[in-house]
Amino acid sequence: MHEYLKNFDEKELKCYFNSLGLDKKYFNTFKDMFSNTYNAWIQDEDESDTEYLDKQLTIGKPLREDVAQFVSDHLVLYAKYMEQGNSETWSHYMMDNYSNFEYDEERTLFDAFHHFSNLENSNVDAIEEIKIHCKALGGDAFFIEYYIYEMMNAHFPNIEQVKQFSFICNKKINEGYDSEYAKDFAFATVSILEGDVFFSKDFACSEIDKEVFADTYAWAKCNRKHEPIPKIKGTTLYYVSEADEYSEKFTVVYGKALKELGDKESAIKHARLNTDLFFKGLEKYHEEHKGQERDMDDKNQRLYAEEYINKQMYIIPKYGLSGDNEDILDFCYRLESVACCMGDFEDDMHYPKAIRQMEFDKLEKDIVNYNPKIEKDKKELEGLKIRLNVYKEELKEFEELD
């Protein structure tokens, strides 16, 4: 037989196995795997093509050594999982599906988890197998929880980020926070590191913003709704919780308030009130628009919510309103909007003119939408038209005075 194709004898095979540093109990498995692999590979070789075989031996090493290396890589992985306490079925799956050409160990582990999780009547508990693996990595309960979370959400766990999650959890607990807050805070922090948070273009990603975002996320998880909200980013559909949206909105408002107020506590207080009102505004929008999916990125919903903030934070205090009468509140909001456009009514004459113009616009709209059904309604409509003409004349007088 050509030297390139020559097989190991028993002594050489044992010597190669011993170099792996594995327990002797795995030798027979190694021997069987080597034999099966060698026989499969040698069938692909043409023993009559000595020129080709000479070349292979020149540029590489004998086939038996390649086979031994391939088998060793897989057997070492099998032994690793057996020794750390995983089941034989799990360990065999890891060995049989591991390929040092296509998949690394983490990918094989990920595939194993989902294979056994989706397998009907499986005698392998995928979550328990992962727990064993995490403990072998030195992971605590927080490490294990986040590792499994990543697995179940179709992510390849990044060990460094899983360690970071565990570290932050323990740090927050040592600072006096409960475990739920600690986990939510850590989750938000790691999500920022992974780039999983869909920040708006206004989100300022400084270190202090990350801290505030994580703190707000942890607070919101305890105090806001948890129902997933469908969102679209480009062509990708994804889901977020209200805690995600609340935290982002809060942090954007906080960042701006901190620049204006210069005081962290005041900025947090302002951002909390502003963000609470924003989501209250979204709720009111959906009370008026039944069946419409909530979407913070929808222009109409955002404008409605921002208008609600302005009414509650500025209009009601300025005009001393109770907030119960929506018509008066809307009128004052419109009045204030016109005031801003006119430079806060620097000329006193503009003030009554602006009021009359708003009344004229509203009345004109009411007349267009009026649908008289009885004689009394028709008379009322005539009265509205007369009042509209009066307003029109008054507006002409204002124009002449200008």
Image: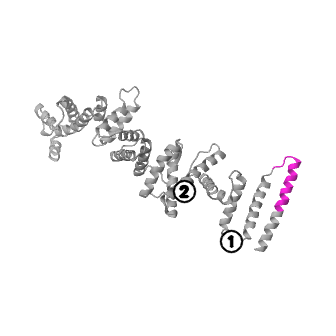
> In the picture provided, is 11 more to the left or to the right than 127?
left
- Report the mark closest to the observer, 2 or 1: 2
Check disc 2 and give the amino acid type: His
Q: Residue at x 39, y 44 (%)?
A: 173
Label ID, residue 270: 2
Check disc 1 and give the amino acid type: Glu
Of all residues shown, which one is farthest toward the front?
A: 176
Residue 121 position in % (x across, y down): 40, 25
Q: Residue at x 88, y 52 (%)?
A: 379
Task: State yes or no: residue 217 in magenta.
Answer: no
Name the image quarter holding the N terminus: top left
Locate residue 337: give its quadrant: bottom right
Task: State yes or no: residue 384 in magenta.
Answer: yes
Q: Residue at x 84, y 46 (%)?
A: 373
- Which residue has dot 1 on it? 346
Image: magenta residue range = 371-389
> In the picture provided, is 258 more to the left or to the right than 59?
right
Q: Residue at x 37, y 47 (%)?
A: 171
The residue closer to the viewer here, 278 or 179, is 179
> In the picture provided, is 113 more to the left or to the right than 347?
left
Residue 22 position in % (x across, y down): 18, 35
> In the picture provided, is 342 more to the left or to the right than 155?
right
